[in-house]
Image (spheres, coloured by chain):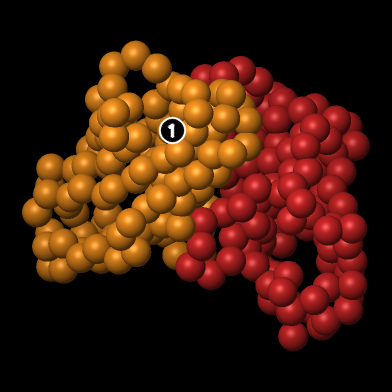
Amino acid sequence: DTGVSQDPRHKITKRGQNVTFRCDPISEHNRLYWYRQTLGQGPEFLTYFQNEAQLEKSRLLSDRFSAERPKGSFSTLEIQRTEQGDSAMYLCASSLLGPNQPQHFGDGTRLSIL
Amino acid sequence: AQSVTQPDIHITVSEGASLELRCNYSYGATPYLFWYVQSPGQGLQLLLKYFSGDTLVQGIKGFEAEFKRSQSSFNLRKPSVHWSDAAEYFCAVAAGGGGNKLTFGTGTQLKVEL
């Protein structure tokens, strides 16, 4: 069990640029989640996958955001035309399928928009 | 929709003193409740979880929490705090099982005085 891995840990970019983050879940975890955390707040749910299917998206996930999990393993989160308000920590979590399975979090990707 | 309230933004305790962090939830059915801890720049680590059964649950690092349905609370406790416990603590609720999206409180920042 190597844990949930996220890359990069930090990303600094200019407003208007596109960015992509990667998440590698714990192997054999069926579910993969993305959350966003701004300073002084708890994480907020963005979207989740069960295997390769994206089952739910939050209204926080504007049309500039897209997430994929093409083979049911790793996932990517892309933000197009970044805005100042996108500055946040983006957290990925994974879990096994089942009502008693907790989510395990990665260390996140810190995005800073200049 | 579910929600979580953590009334205390900051708490300071002396090392060796007891600790109680408050959490109140709102959810129409039986909740699935969690406490996570986050150190600066890191992801979230699961401390403990409640799904059903015994309302007093034990977690890692000497933490415990008690589920009280009548008060809609799930307070976190530790009998003797160590300096390494300084971190931010988040209470979270999941709807329909631990595999579903988490709704977090805004967190409680714990400071430990030596």
Say what amino acid the circle numbered 1 marks. Leu
* Quadrant in which residue A81 is drawn: bottom right
* Quadrant in which residue B101 is drawn: top right
Q: Is residue A76 visible?
A: yes
Residue at the limit of the structure toward the top, as seen here: B53
Front-most of residues A1 and B14: B14
Subunit of mark 1? B
Q: Is residue A24 left or right of residue B92?
A: right
- Residue ID at (90%, 37%): A70
Chain in orange, by letter, is B
Front-most of residues B47 and B75: B75
Q: Is residue A27 visible?
A: no
Give chain A's shade: red
- Residue ID at (13%, 68%): B114
Q: Is residue A100 left or right of residue B34?
A: right
- Residue ID at (80%, 32%): A55
Classify 10 Å Cα crowding around label 1: few (below 14), some (14-19), many (20 and above). Answer: many
Q: Is residue A32 left or right of residue B11?
A: right
Spot occupied by residue A79 in the image (x, y as percentages of width and height) = 84, 63
Is B26 located above or below residue B31 in the figure? Answer: below
Spot occupied by residue B39 in the image (x, y as percentages of width and height) = 42, 59
Spot occupied by residue B27 in the image (x, y as percentages of width and height) = 49, 33
Quadrant location of the N terminus of chain B? top right
Is A60 located above or below residue B102 in the figure? Answer: below
Q: Which residue is mark 1?
A: B33
Residue at the limit of the structure toward the bottom, as seen here: A114
Spot occupied by residue B96 in the image (x, y as percentages of width and height) = 58, 24
- Residue ID at (20%, 65%): B12
* Quadrant in which residue A111 is drawn: bottom right
